[in-house]
Image (spheres, rainbow, N blue to C red):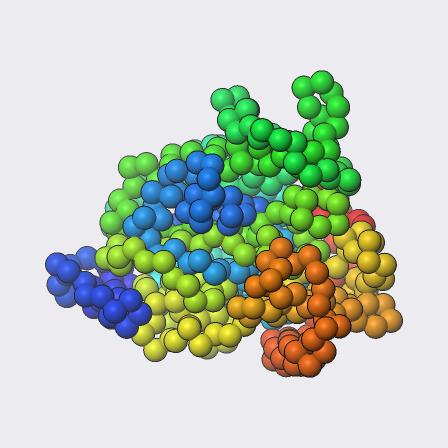
Amino acid sequence: MTRRLGIACGVIGAAIAGVLGAELIGCTESAPGPRNVIIISLDTVRRDHLPTYGYARPTAPFVDSLARDALVFDRAFAQETNTNPSHTSMFTGLYPPAHGSVANGVRLGADQTVLAQILRAAGYRTGGFVSGATLQERASGLSRGFDRYDDEFPGLRRDGMETVKRARAWLSEGSAEQPFFLFVHLYDAHGPYLPPAGYVGLFQSAEDGPWIERIPDYQRVPDKNGRLVHHANWYVDRYDAMIRYEDDCVRGLLKGQDLERSIVVVLSDHGETFHERYGSLGHGAEVHDEQTRIPLLIRVPGLPHARRSEFTETVDLLPTLTDLLGLPSDPAVQGHSLIAPNQNLGDREFVFASARPADSHYADRGYRLDRTRRIHSIRSDRWKLIRLPGRETDYVELYDLTADPGEQSDVAAAHPELRDELRARLAAWTSLRGADGPVPETMDPAVLNQLQSLGYVGD
């Protein structure tokens, strides 16, 4: 147990030498290493709306300060674009077809092991604090392994500051001798964007921006004159203000914590579409980069700051953490450690994502989708192929990300050989990771009502 409660510097030193090619300065075999784990999930936060990734607005100055001492992953991708299945991939190290939680409201099967169970078995105190209805136990099944899973609140969401308050209270109750695992989920940047006092008007665009034709019901917040707004930048300004609010939540959570003994992970479960496609805003039912490409930073005491350019996926989180902590990882895990010397992630050619289908997102293309199957994508440096399940025949789209990073022009017809090659690779990948099962037709009525209110159910 000693090795699990206080990591020897040799583990971190090997990681640096093997992955970063650097030497660990001032570290001895007896020096204490990180022993606590803090994972902070910023629900619905786009990578390209954080200053760490080049955004001009100061939406997250505190997270940016953390990033300056962290490993920052420039090409990290979520495996799903809805909250529940994306977080399940983080905590199981499995892709959605394998772990089976293929949609919000579909609970994780009882036979799956999650990170909290692994850490509790290793002697960790475990606490989870969530802010959105989609991660409540009755909707997700993710409470297993947590000594405390704080998920009860009125309505569909809880204010991030209240979640942080509860998490800090739980931290204060623990023994300084016992390591802890803390998971905090912040939901404030999820629509509708409702900046609290002091954040309203924090960011103001000089122009209206593109027109958004279809405003989802849950996003229908009138302006000060009582009118429904269709201009994209009105929503972007409020969204950015909510990210700044979450940044202050993160600052409050970590204030006074011993970060030299704690691994801190900050990431998102998926991004958000504003005006890029289908005349709407929101997320889910899509696997385009604005939703799948996410922020990911891992701050590890003893590891120097570095920007990492290899492909990474959220399924890599669990094996990375168990590797850092010197704990065994289940061989069934499909992700890869991001710090193990024997892993050459530069060889990873492709990343994969999936989503539940919704006809409304493809009405402009005339697609008729089979909602019992899933959308899948395979992405390389330059190319992305998306396979959409049709009721009669599947639809395939191909994008040249070098010429068209916004994925606006389908070039599948112009590159039939490449299209077919990528389609075959995607078919081989899905066959190895579990077949798609249909989303259950029955669901807890309370969960169903919540999902309908959040725009996740219905077409």
Which of 365 and 159 lies nearest the eye of the viewer? 365
At 65% from the left and 81% from the top, the residue drawn is 421
At 28% from the left and 47% from the top, the residue drawn is 259
Identify the image quadrant of the N terminus: bottom left
Which of 227 and 459 lies nearest the eye of the viewer? 227
Q: Is residue 45 left or right of residue 361?
A: left
**How many circles with numbers are drawn on the protein?**
0
Estimate the x, y position of residue 370 in percent, counting from the top left: 81, 65
Estimate the x, y position of residue 359 in percent, counting from the top left: 81, 56
Residue 92: tell me if it is visible. yes
Estimate the x, y position of residue 306 in percent, counting from the top left: 32, 58
Residue 124: tell me if it is visible. no
Estimate the x, y position of residue 234 in percent, counting from the top left: 64, 31
Q: Residue furthest top?
A: 225
Which of 47 and 263 lies nearest the eye of the viewer? 47
Which of 120 and 407 lies nearest the eye of the viewer? 407
Q: Is residue 173 left or right of residue 439?
A: left
Residue 292's place in the image compared with 448, above or below, is below
Residue 305 lies in what quarter of the image? bottom left
At 12% from the left and 59% from the top, the residue drawn is 26
Residue 338's place in the image compared with 208, above or below, is below
